Image: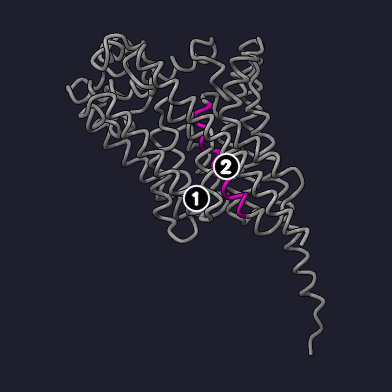
């Protein structure tokens, strides 16, 4: 009876916390939307303005101008004369192909449809993992959804592709590979998938992902012409310089490089530490996918490792944290929790909001430390899984035979 009472008390606390965060974020989102509407003529979604402007240029037959900040800024004025200067376009031609239809609608309408539709898809996928009614509030209160929604970013698009791939790997490996290949819209977020699949021996998904990525890239180059390739590569160099010098706000970023640069560490030492994080993350992901069997463990390692590898990681990308949170929650409720797991997952759940506040108010970015903690959870789960397997095999080996 005491265990049942504790369970219901914990459930009530989760609902209260989730409802509080949900209400606070909803009110904050509305206030920001009103403020931005008066100031810019756009209710949030200022990052989406770049997508819409690139789409408009492409529809006008001038896709190469998407890589010109002046062209993007001038086109954005079609949404509102008072709109703030949008960010530059650093994306590959694959993503330009995906977002090309966006400018068929007015900017505000297009933003609303894009943001709500992509968020709904990711929420539906999370509900497949957490179908219980008690999961609605933690899902809807997840700050990652709201941060991505407010900025009009593509975090829910990439997170949906990653989660769909993970859920399909066992039963539909070819379709899972297609989802992974479509991550070519943001290649640095899919960079560890090939390593993970190779270490797990999932060659059907590996080949399907490679073929999809090559075909997707080939089609986009065929549509826009080969001249778009040097423009994209040049934009990567520009983005790298912007991150290193702080022209892109470090307070909104979650990479080790940004964390150290915000702490006034020099460029070369910061890159060295970023490289160490990348090697450690990639190596650990490879080991876990080689040794672990549980989807939950592998997914947690892959998400944490992905965020440790790339220096170009924003807090809105942390909507990906919803994947290990959901999967490990189900596993914890089913098989039992290991020590500190719930606390780490709770901080992961709060991180998209806390990361922004910490970056702007305290000038401290703790995202990389959180990703290391999540990777630690995956490593410990792998050892626990191996020890349980060894225990079961040991018990079977001492069963007397007739």
Q: Residue furthest left?
A: 60
Task: Please provide the residue range marked out in magenta.
Answer: 315-330
Q: Residue 96: horizontal and vertical position, in percent?
A: 30, 29
Q: Per the image, is 329 magenta? A: yes
Q: Which residue is pictured at 54% across the width and 13% down the height?
A: 244
Tell me: residue 283, above or below residue 102.
Answer: below
Would residue 316 appear left or right of 214 to someone viewing this image? right
Q: Residue 392: horizontal and vertical position, in percent?
A: 75, 68
Q: Residue 166 carries which label?
A: 1
**Residue 2's quadrant in the figure?**
bottom right
Q: Which residue is pictured at 60% across the width and 33% down the height?
A: 350
Would residue 120 appear left or right of 296 to someone viewing this image? left
Would residue 2 appear left or right of 378 to someone viewing this image? right
Tell me: residue 302, above or below residue 107.
Answer: below
Quarter of the image for the N terminus: give it: bottom right
Q: Which residue is pictured at 66% across the width and 32% down the height?
A: 370
Number of residues whose C-alpha sits closer than 10 Å to that of mark 2, classed few (under 14), some (14–19) or many (20 or more)? many
Residue behind mark 2? 302
Instruction: Kindly state the secondary structure of the residue where label 2 is placed.
Output: helix
Quarter of the image for the C terminus: give it: bottom right
Q: Residue 225: horizontal and vertical position, in percent?
A: 23, 27
Q: Residue 320: horizontal and vertical position, in percent?
A: 52, 38
Q: Per the image, is 78 magenta? A: no
Number of residues whose C-alpha sits closer than 10 Å to that of mark 1, classed few (under 14), some (14–19) or many (20 or more)? many
Q: Which mark is residue 249?
A: none
Q: Which residue is pictured at 58% across the width and 35% down the height?
A: 20
Q: Which of 95 and 267 is in front in this view?
A: 95
Tell me: residue 13, above or below residue 57.
Answer: below
The secondary structure that dominates the magenta segment is helix
Q: CB under 8 Å between callouts 2 and 1?
A: yes
**Residue 32's quadrant in the figure?**
top left
């Amino acid at each position: 009876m005491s265990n049942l009472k504790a369970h219901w008390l914990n459930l009530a606390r989760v609902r209260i916390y989730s409802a509080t965060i949900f209400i606070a974020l909803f009110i904050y989102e509305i206030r920001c939307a009103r403020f931005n509407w008066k100031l810019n003529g756009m209710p949030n979604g200022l990052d989406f303005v770049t997508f819409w402007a690139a789409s408009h240029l492409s529809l006008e037959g001038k896709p190469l101008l998407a890589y010109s900040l002046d062209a993007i800024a001038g086109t954005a004025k079609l949404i509102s004369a008072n709109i703030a200067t949008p960010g530059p376009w650093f994306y590959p031609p694959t993503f330009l192909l995906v977002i090309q239809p966006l400018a068929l609608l007015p900017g505000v309408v297009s933003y609303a449809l894009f943001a709500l539709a992509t968020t709904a898809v990711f929420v539906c996928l999370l509900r497949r993992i957490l179908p219980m009614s008690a999961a609605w509030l933690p899902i809807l209160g997840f700050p990652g959804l709201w941060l991505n929604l407010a900025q009009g970013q593509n975090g829910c698009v990439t997170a949906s592709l990653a989660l769909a791939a993970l859920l399909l790997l066992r039963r539909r490996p070819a379709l899972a590979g297609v989802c992974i290949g479509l991550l070519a819209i943001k290649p640095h977020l899919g960079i560890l998938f090939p390593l993970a699949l190779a270490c797990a021996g999932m060659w059907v998904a590996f080949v399907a992902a490679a073929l999809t990525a090559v075909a997707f890239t080939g089609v986009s180059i065929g549509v826009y012409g080969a001249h778009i390739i040097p423009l994209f590569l040049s934009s990567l160099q520009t983005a790298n310089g912007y991150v290193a010098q702080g022209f892109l706000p470090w307070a909104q970023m979650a990479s080790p490089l940004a964390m150290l640069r915000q702490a006034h560490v020099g460029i070369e030492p910061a890159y060295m530490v970023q490289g160490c994080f990348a090697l450690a993350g990639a190596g650990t992901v490879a080991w876990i996918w080689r040794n672990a069997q549980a989807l939950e463990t592998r997914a947690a390692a892959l998400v944490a490792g992905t965020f440790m590898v790339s220096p170009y990681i924003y807090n809105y990308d942390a909507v990906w944290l919803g994947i290990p949170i959901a999967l490990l929650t189900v596993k914890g409720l089913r098989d039992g929790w290991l020590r500190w797991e719930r606390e780490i997952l709770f901080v992961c759940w709060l991180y998209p909001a806390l990361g922004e506040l910490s970056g702007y108010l305290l000038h401290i970015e703790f995202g990389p430390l959180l990703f290391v903690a999540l990777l630690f959870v995956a490593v410990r789960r792998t050892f626990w899984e191996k020890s349980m397997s060894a225990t079961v095999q040991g018990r079977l080996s001492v069963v007397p035979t007739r």
